[in-house]
Amino acid sequence: MTVILYLWWIVSNGILSYFSIDFFLSITQADGKKHIPILLTITIVLTAVITRWQIPGTFWLEIPLWMVYAIVFIKIRWANLLAPMAILFTLRTFTEGFTAVLTAYAASHFNLSFDGTWVQIAFSLSLDILFLLLLIWIQKRAAFSLQKSISPYLYALLLPSALMVLSIRYGLRLDSPTFAQYLSSFQRGSSFTALFLLSGAAVVFFIMIEIVCKVTRLAEQETAVALLTSQLSAQQTYMEEAKTRNAQYAAFQHDIKNHLLVLSGLIREAKYGAAEQYATNLQAGCSSITIPVSTGNLILDTLLKEKLGHARYCEIHVDCKVRIPFSFHAEDLDLCVVFSNILDNAITACMQVEKAKRFLSITTKVRANFLVIESTNSADISSPIQKGIGLQNIEAISRKYQGITEIENTDGTFRISVLLCSLQKAG
């Protein structure tokens, strides 16, 4: 092996390793850039040693090396790294297979008038560029699907990928010390057959990626539809209960004159104790129907009265300290989206615990140009937090107002904090 070819393999493998690591970190959304030099250095040193002494079978050493890097250094769960690793090592196998077959064919069947080293470098460079372009395409096309933890849909990609890698590497003896002699013995027909099979396998591989992407997206859409259906059912229940509360309020308004007559009669007869007790009972009955809310925003007042009234109707202890200052500028619709989703999720969570432990508290605080909305409610500690449409809508509004959303579920209490930055007032 010439010095030029030796150096080329080191440089080529270093570049491919760097972009492979970048692809891996992008897909897994891990913060491991500070560890890139470590893995890159190890990879380059291994390449230099392997190329210099022609050590076979090192491909299988790189897989555990990557797994140690992912699990130990950048703390990625194994279930989240299988799909991107399958992509990388399958593409690596295709690249090695095409390079080996094309180089061996050119060396055996053409009388080259110049150094064959440059032919190998040309083949390698072309396939390296194709490898990088395919990584970019997969990253743009399939990132959403590959970011999902291992699922039945990804088995459609992982198992065939493993079969392809094994078939290509053992079929072409890529990890054998005699693979060069083996490939150079190929006749023209055998070389074309190998290239045809490699091309067919590559086409099938990319079709599988496309299928997994579509199936994953369809599954996400079905989940979203199921969530929306659930929310619609909850809203229908809420509307029925709202009708009941409105009927109670109408009945109370209808009877208010009679209540006032009773109170007036008790006072005239100097039965002040009875009058006080009657007034207390009347006030309690009124409180069970509606909750007084004054946030400084009439539209939000209406929303909170309905939502909190529904919460109290569900026997949830309610504490509301919401005030929107005049200096804070936000669209009414956006505020309603945030508060309605917070309260809907809180009420749903409270209904999963026993009545004596149900509570809901929602407050606002102003800090400089920011409005902080905080809500806590009782929740089932055994239920993990799932980001449904409601939380996604809250986070979308938070991003719109250059803010953040924080959630946690500890000790049977769910807490959400939403920070919003005031919009600049037009004019």
Image (cartoon, rainbow, N blue to C red):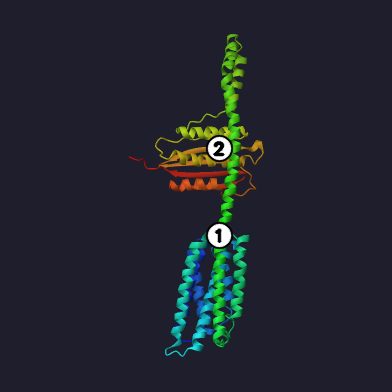
Report crowding for label 1: few under 14, some 14 to 19, many 20 or more residues within 10 A (C-alpha). Answer: some
The residue that mark 2 highlights is 361
Q: In which quadrant of the rendered view does residue 319 lie?
A: top right
Earlier-in-chain disc, 2 versus 1: 1
Residue 3 percent location from the top left of the image: 45, 85
Question: Which residue appears at 50% of the width and 41% of the height?
Answer: 337
Q: Is residue 237 visible?
A: yes
CA gap, disc 2 and disc 1: 42 Å
Q: Is residue 147 visible?
A: no
Q: Secondary structure at mark 2?
A: strand
Q: Residue furthest left?
A: 427
The residue that mark 1 highlights is 214
Quadrant that contains the C terminus: top left
Side of 61 where 132 appears, left or right: left
Report crowding for label 2: few under 14, some 14 to 19, many 20 or more residues within 10 A (C-alpha). Answer: some
Residue 421 percent location from the top left of the image: 42, 44
Residue 417 percent location from the top left of the image: 51, 44
Q: Nearer the viewer, residue 309 or 157?
A: 157
- Amino acid carrying mark 1 in the image: Lys
Q: Can you say whether 9 is above or below 79 in the image?
A: below
Q: Residue furthest front?
A: 189
